Amino acid sequence: MGHAQRRFVSTATKLVSVPLSSLRSFPPKEALASRSSSFSPEAWAALQPPPPSALSALSHRIGLGAVLQIPELEQACTHPSVLPLFTRRHPNQKPPPANENLSTLGNALLGLFASEFVAASYPHLPTRVVKAAVSAYVGPNTCANVAKEVGAAPLLRWHRTPSTPLKPAVLHHDALSSIPRSLVALIYQRRSLSFARKFTHQFFLSREVDLRKMLKFRDPKVALAETVAKFGREKPISRLLKETGRFSNSPVFVVGVYSGTEELGEGFGSSLKMAEYRAAEDALHRTFPDVDGDIFTIGGEVEYTPGEIGTTEIRLGSAGRSSIISPSPLSIVSPESH
Amino acid sequence: MLASVTKPIFRAQLSSKQSNGHFAFVPQIRKLVFEYSQNWPSSTNTRTYLRNNLQNLARANPHVEVVVRQRNNRQPIIRGFYLNNNEKVIPLNGFEVTGIEKKVQLLLDSSGAKIKSLKRRTVESATESARGIWSGLHDIPFQI
């Protein structure tokens, strides 16, 4: 599909389309009554509730046909950005319930389950990596993707809102991400915390997240040498294991880094230096082992004893400033210029 | 040459990849629309199917939204809407009720992905291959 077609499809999916089977009469009476231009078809379409059959189909698709009812599903799919639009068009009617509170509760629950999962699966991970992993598992991007993959995008009721000084903008992405959060909150309310945790595990924590991309080092060879020295082992030496295509335009080198006879890590690359760098990175990634198997049943429930806070074993490159965007030197106004 | 710090990770931009079926399976079909004609004879078998089999189908597949539309003076059609925003349309004229059931099952089982043909010109040669035959299941090169 070309660029123009892709853009057309993505725009079309964001536009609201009302299925004719759910309407009693079409065109709506308001459109015929007001001959002036006060009737806006886009606003009318944005306010139409999704048909009950579609909501029921959604609940069965995620395996919760017996748990969730249609009115609460409708609430879960209504973003609060649509309420001002509703009160403007129907000032005398009661506005539909929106998913703001459900979304907040669901967000908190998702964060709770995801941080439990990451901390239990990778006990020795640095805190900033745990936070990044939690964002990857249940963050705004993932929630929006889950809503699309589960088929909730055509059921969403929302309204694009520009950013004001008090509130941020509401985009399609933000409105979509509120749906899975609301669903988790509804499951917690209708069933139990453990049921909600099982649902989160099946739909969020089973997704693929590569933690190695979040564990980055300024100089992995130096960091590895320091770590190995700390544990009193032999100095790491990298050895070329396999190579092909040297002096061609697509060489591949496989390098292993050894401490004595024990292999610590292996890496491939299109140059010797690249393969050696990756081998050192691989060795450092293996110092954060993961717990194999189902973390919820492996040891049973025990009393939690927090680990002692001490100095980090390995010097990481990103020293806690990963969420701060540092301004470029040209944008910083020096005090002497005033 | 080395950066003073590594590239920062912007947590709001992180996401994960789907693994449908690893734990929970989400069926990819969202809606099934049957379009039939009341006056033309080509829709007779479709009308029989809708009268006798449709309710059982809808009950057996609660994850699918089933819609029936009357569309006069046209051939009968079945449309499947999928979660990847694709649509599959199959005409039902010329099929018996059992044939219609098979086409319905085809749409229910499909993922909506485009069907890529694997037909290619096969290599025909009188001599053995120079580097042997690749096999992902054998330790040493596979010999016929």
Image (cartoon, grey):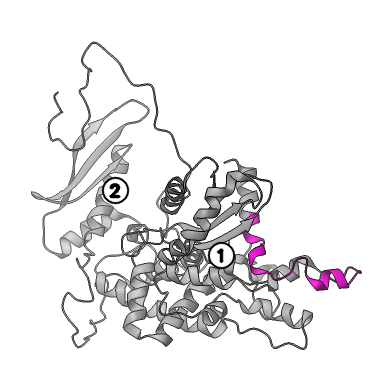
Q: Earlier in the sequence, mark 2 or mark 1?
A: 1
Give the x, y percent position of residue B62: 44, 67
Instruction: Say what secondary structure mark 1 lies in.
Output: helix
The chain under label 2 reads A
Find the residue positioned furthest to the right: A36
x, y percent for residue B2: 40, 52
Q: Quadrant of the N terminus of chain A?
A: top right
Residue A129 visible somewhere in the drawing = no
Q: Is residue A174 left or right of residue A95?
A: left
- Name the residue nearer the viewer: A117 or A157: A157
Of all chains, the one bearing label 1 is: A
Label 1: few (<14), some (14–19) or many (≥20) C-alpha neighbours in 10 Å = many
- For residue A153, the mark is 1
Q: Which residue is mark 2?
A: A278
Q: Amino acid at mark 1?
A: Ala
- Can you tell which of label 2 and label 1 is closer to the viewer? 1
Q: Which residues are magenta?
A: A11-39
In the drawing, does residue A86 fall left or right of residue A114?
right
- Occupied quadrant, residue A285: bottom left
Q: Nearer the viewer, residue A265 or A139?
A: A139
Residue B17 position within the rendered picture, expressed as x and y whole percent measured from the top left: 41, 58
- Give above or below for A299 relative to A129: below
